[in-house]
Image: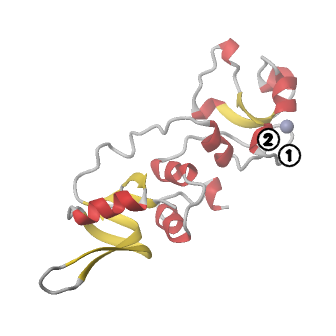
């Protein structure tokens, strides 16, 4: 499992390991925590008091420092696993539900026609449909799209990047999504 590290202002920064979260905690970087307690680490015993140091890690930590980027300017990098998650493993042409293994990144305007390799020009397609469409546009191939592509926001991107997201992390990120987001339906 991963801890969601956000800026003190609540802007997502990265998914980090429990160990990295402990380091932030020990360094005094954590300003606030949210979500549930997911792990407790025991440190050494204090020589005088005999008490053992304990660091609890929550599923969401707000750390000091400003966001390194403007979240609204950001274009999340395009990766197949995130594309398939955006499109819920559904082929945009036949509507079939496939395993990741049988899916491909399909360029709506083909690369051969100078279609960009960008979120707005790609959809998930099964191998058969991708092959059938070939280097044609949906109009030329008479294969209309069953859903429209979109570029994920920073908050959606954080959801797409973590397949084992905890429910409180999902809730935190989903609070920033528009109601129309496919990730909410
Ligand atoms: Zn298909």
> For mark 1, what is the residue?
96
Residue depicted at 12% across the width and 84% down the height: 48
Q: Is residue 8 visible?
A: no
Q: CB of residue at label 2: within 8 Å of ligand 1?
A: yes
Side (left or right) of 131 relative to 40:
right
User: What is the crowding at mark 1: few (fewer than 14 residues within 10 Å), some, or many (at least 20)?
Assistant: few
In the rendered view, would you say 155 is above or below 147?
below
The quarter of the image that holds ligand 1 is top right
SS under mark 1: loop
**Residue 147, percent from left and from top:** 74, 43
**Residue 180, percent from left and from top:** 61, 56
Q: Quadrant of the C terminus?
A: bottom right
Q: CB of residue at label 1: within 8 Å of ligand 1?
A: yes
Assess whether mark 2 and mark 1 are in contact (beta carbons under 8 angstroms). Answer: yes
User: What is the crowding at mark 2: few (fewer than 14 residues within 10 Å), some, or many (at least 20)?
Assistant: many
Instruction: Give the mark nearest the N terminus, 1 or 2.
Output: 2
> For mark 2, what is the residue?
91
Towards the viewer: 63 or 145? 63
**Residue 103, percent from left and from top:** 77, 37
Residue depicted at 79% across the width and 18% down the height: 136
**Residue 1, percent from left and from top:** 52, 61
In the rendered view, would you say 146 is above or below 45?
above
């Amino acid at each position: 499992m991963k801890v969601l590290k956000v800026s003190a202002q609540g802007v997502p920064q990265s998914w980090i390991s429990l160990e990295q979260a402990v380091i932030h905690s020990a360094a005094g970087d954590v300003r606030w925590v949210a979500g549930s307690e997911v792990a407790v680490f025991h440190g050494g015993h204090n020589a005088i008091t005999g008490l053992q140091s304990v660091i609890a890690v929550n599923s969401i930590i707000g750390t000091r420092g400003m966001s390194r980027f403007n979240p609204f300017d950001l274009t999340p990098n395009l990766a197949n696993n995130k594309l398939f998650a955006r499109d819920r493993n559904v082929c945009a042409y036949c509507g079939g539900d496939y395993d990741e293994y049988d899916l491909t990144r399909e360029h709506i305007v083909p690369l051969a026609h100078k279609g960009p390799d960008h979120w707005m020009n790609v959809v998930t397609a099964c191998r058969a449909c991708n092959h059938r469409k070939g280097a044609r546009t949906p109009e030329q191939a008479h294969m209309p799209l069953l859903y429209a592509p979109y570029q994920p926001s920073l908050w959606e991107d954080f959801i797409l990047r973590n397949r084992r997201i905890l429910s409180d992390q999902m809730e935190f990120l989903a609070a920033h999504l528009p109601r129309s987001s496919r990730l909410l339906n």
